[in-house]
Image (cartoon, grey):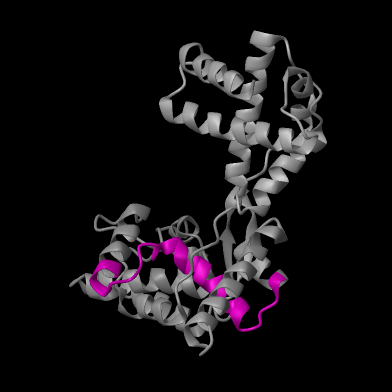
């Protein structure tokens, strides 16, 4: 019975739903696994009557078993999608339906961990990015920009939106406009202030309403240009592909956390609305500690 149902399901997928061969193959494998699970739990082959009586607990048990075998959220979400499609087929061809699947929340794929550079790599970027260019003004601009990203945790868009007049006087904090127009205050380290001051000496039009970071024609620097500068540098120095301007922001948060900074303070500095967004950096720090342990421990 099970093999016949799966065969009919595959034909229905391919002919009526125009599904690709790989989708048909994958869904068929998922459905077979579910039918085997149901047969095992009932102690008999799962026929149409049993499939119509499937409960939400049955489906959750199937997905939980998949999780125990190591299936990630995205894989379990695909299995759930396969079952929903299978039951659409059962209703269309055999009049069998269940509300159980509507009661199951789709497993959410985990967001990837932020990729941060090591402290040595981040320091090398802000100190050596100028090597990409032979023009003194460009060197000073790129160094100041990377210092701002790593030293203050700004997004590239936030840094490039700044005007010269936005720079604070004396020891005041920098006022940054983040996502959704949300304002935050970010303190500037002395080394960041020095880098900005060095760039302003080369700035083509250092009046208050001029863009802080400019391109070769004097207009506001394009993010693509800054990204290319760092891309050229990382290839020159053999840094990983994730060495991007945004990785410097991730590095800012990760390194602060590693040195004992409070998570709430990091949230404020980054301008995150939710603490759960900032908490992802605790996972980064843990994974980095484990990587160090595996490399260094004699019994690892």
Q: Is residue 42 left or right of residue 238?
A: right
- The residue lying toward the viewer, choosing from 63 and 198, is 63
The residue drawn where x is 58% and y is 56% is 177
Give x and y (percent) for residue 153. Answer: 53, 68
Q: Tally the marks.
A: 0
Position of residue 121 relative to residue 100, above or below, is below
**In the rendered structure, which segment of residues is drawn in magenta?**
234-263
Quarter of the rendering occupied by the N terminus? top right
Question: Quadrant of residue 175 in the image?
Answer: bottom right
Instruction: Residue at the far front: name it.
Output: 44
Q: Main secondary structure of the magenta part?
A: helix
Q: Is residue 167 visible?
A: no
**Residue 261 drawn in magenta:** yes
Give x and y (percent) for residue 250. Answer: 52, 67
Q: Is residue 170 visible?
A: yes
The residue drawn where x is 62% and y is 39% is 77
**Residue 240 drawn in magenta:** yes
Give x and y (percent) for residue 68. Answer: 67, 53
The residue drawn where x is 65% and y is 28% is 83
Instruction: Residue at the far left: name it.
Output: 134
- The residue lying toward the viewer, choosing from 150 and 109, is 109
């Amino acid at each position: 019975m099970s093999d016949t149902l799966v065969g009919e399901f595959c034909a229905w997928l391919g002919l009526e739903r125009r599904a690709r061969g790989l989708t048909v193959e994958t869904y068929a494998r998922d459905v077979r696994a579910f039918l085997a699970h149901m047969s095992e739990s009932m102690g008999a082959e799962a026929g149409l009557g049993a499939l119509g009586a499937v409960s939400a607990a049955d489906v959750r048990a199937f997905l939980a078993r998949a999780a125990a075998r190591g299936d990630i959220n995205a894989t379990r979400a695909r299995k759930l999608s396969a079952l929903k499609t299978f039951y659409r087929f059962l209703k269309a061809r055999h009049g069998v339906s269940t509300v159980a699947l509507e009661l199951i929340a789709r497993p959410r794929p985990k967001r990837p961990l932020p990729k941060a550079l090591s402290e040595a790599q981040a320091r090398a970027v802000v100190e050596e990015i100028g090597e990409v260019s032979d023009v003194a003004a460009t060197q000073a601009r790129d160094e100041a920009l990377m210092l701002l990203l790593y030293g203050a945790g700004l997004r590239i868009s936030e840094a490039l939106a700044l005007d010269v007049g936005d720079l604070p006087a004396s020891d005041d904090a920098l006022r940054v406009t983040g996502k959704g127009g949300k304002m935050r205050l970010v303190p500037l380290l002395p080394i960041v202030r020095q880098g900005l001051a060095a760039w302003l000496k080369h700035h083509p039009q250092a009046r208050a309403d001029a863009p802080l970071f400019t391109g070769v024609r004097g207009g506001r620097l394009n993010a693509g240009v800054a990204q290319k500068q760092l891309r050229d540098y990382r290839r020159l120095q053999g840094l990983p592909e994730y060495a991007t301007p945004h990785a410097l922001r991730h590095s800012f948060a990760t390194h602060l956390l590693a040195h004992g900074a409070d998570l709430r303070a990091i949230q404020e500095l980054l301008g995150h609305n939710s603490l759960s967004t900032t908490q992802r950096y605790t996972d980064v720090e843990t994974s980095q500690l484990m990587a160090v342990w595996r490399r260094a421990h004699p019994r690892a």
